[in-house]
Image: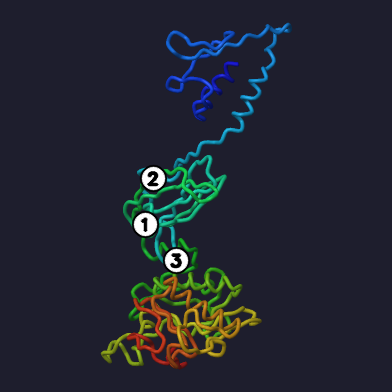
Amino acid sequence: MAVKMRRMRFSLCALGLGLLSFSGCGFNADLSPSHAASPDGSVSVHESRPAPSDGGLPDAAPEDAALDAALDAAPVLPSIAFVSPLDGSTLPRDGVLGHEWAAEVPLRVTAEGVAKVEYWAEDSLLLGDATAPSWELLARFRGEGPRRVVARGLDVDGSELVRDEVSFTIAPPTLGDCHAMLDALGLDWAPAAAAPGVADPVRVQPYIAGVGFRYYYDDVPRALFMDCRLAPRLYELAQLVSAYGYDEILHIGIYNYRCIGGGNPDTDGCTPSQHARADAIDIAGIGMADHSIFESVETDWVISAGATCPGAPVDDADRELHELACSLYRDRVFEIVLTPNYNADHRNHFHVDMTPGSMFIGDSVQGIDSPFTPADF
C-alpha cells in the first residue's frame, strides 16, 4: 500500500479532488482504522484489515479499486519542453536552401497532453507543426544573428494549452564560398580556365539533380561552362523540372562574351549581356531524354494577353511551361525571367538571369538580351 498511497497523494493534489483536506497538498498516511485529524492538523488515513492467513498482502478494498480506476482515467496535464536546439547554442549556416547557405535546425520537444505542436519564429512567424511521437520539425534559417523559437502545444481544436521557448544564434557558414556550396549540393564540377567577364569560372557536368542539360544543337548533354554562382540556380531549376517527371532541359546557351544587342564589351563601350558574365541561361524546352515527351517554348507556349502568372493555359504543355516560368520568378530562383509573353525576341526561349529585377509583359527592362541567332552562341 505504500506505493499506492504515494500515487494517490500526487494524483489527488494534481486533480484538486475535494475528498480530503490538504495542507500544501501534503498528507500523512499511517493505515490506522479511522480517518482523524492529527495534532498538526494533517489528515491521517486509517485502514483496518485482518491479517491474511497465508502471510500475503490483503486483498484490495473496493474503495481502493475505485480510486485506482479514477486515477487511471485522470487526464494528463499538458506539458512541453524543448529538447533541441539547446538554449544558448550557436549553429552555423552549413546547409543549402535554394541557392543560399542556411542553418538546418531540428526543432524537437517533449510533450504530453497536447494534440499538436506549432513552432513559431519570434512568436510571430509560423515555421510549421509536428505531431507525436517525435514532435520534430526541421527548420532552415538563412539570416544570421540571435533567434528565438516558441513551441505552442495545442488541443484538438487548435487552442493553445502550454508553451516553451528557446533562444540560439545563427552563425556564418564554416565554409561559405561558392565552391563549398557546389560540394554541398553534390555537383560534379571543377574549376575552369579564366574567361573574359567571368568572375569565378567553373565547369559543371551536365547531369544536375538527375536532369540533363542539353545544348540546342547537341545530341547528348555536355559539360557546362558558367560562373560558379549560376550552378546552384541550375540545381533549383532541375528540381522543378524533375517534379514533372522530366529528365532533360534543352537550352540555347549560357556564356557568350558580347554586349546586349551585339558588339564587344571591351571595344564598343556597350552594356555587357548577362551571358557575358556566364550567369544567365536561355531555356528552349523541357522533356524526356528519350524524346518521348518534349515541350517547346517556341511551339507549346501560347502567348496571351494579361498576366503571365498564372496565365490561362490552353493545354498541359502550355500549363507546365507557364508553371515553370512562374515558379522560377515566384521562388526567386532567378531575379529576371523573360518569356515569349515579353516580346518577340524571346519567342523561342525563357531568358533567366541573376540581375535584380522582375518579370514584365510588354514593358521594357534594361539589360535584356538581343534576339537569338545561332551565330550568337
Tell me the quarter of the image containing the C terminus: bottom left
For this orientation, the residue located farthest to the right is 54
The type of residue carrying mark 2 is Val
**Is 202 drawn above or below residue 159 in the view shown?**
below
Q: Are marks 1 and 3 in contact (CB under 8 Å)?
A: no
Q: Earlier in the sequence, mark 1 or mark 3?
A: 3
Q: Amino acid at mark 1?
A: Pro
Whether the residues at callouts 2 and 1 have beta carbons within 8 Å, the answer is no
Residue 98 tag number: 3
| Residue drawn at point x = 40 percent, y = 61 percent | 101
Q: Whole-Å distance between the Cαs marked 2 and 1?
A: 22 Å
The answer to whether marks 2 and 3 mark residues whose Cβ atoms lie closer than 8 Å is no
- Residue 125: image quadrant is bottom left
Q: Residues within 10 Å of mark 2 (few under 14, many from 20)?
A: many
Q: Position of residue 25 (x, y in %)?
A: 46, 23
Q: Earlier in the sequence, mark 2 or mark 3?
A: 3
Could you tell me how far apart the alpha carbons at marks 1 and 3 are, in whole angstroms? Answer: 15 Å
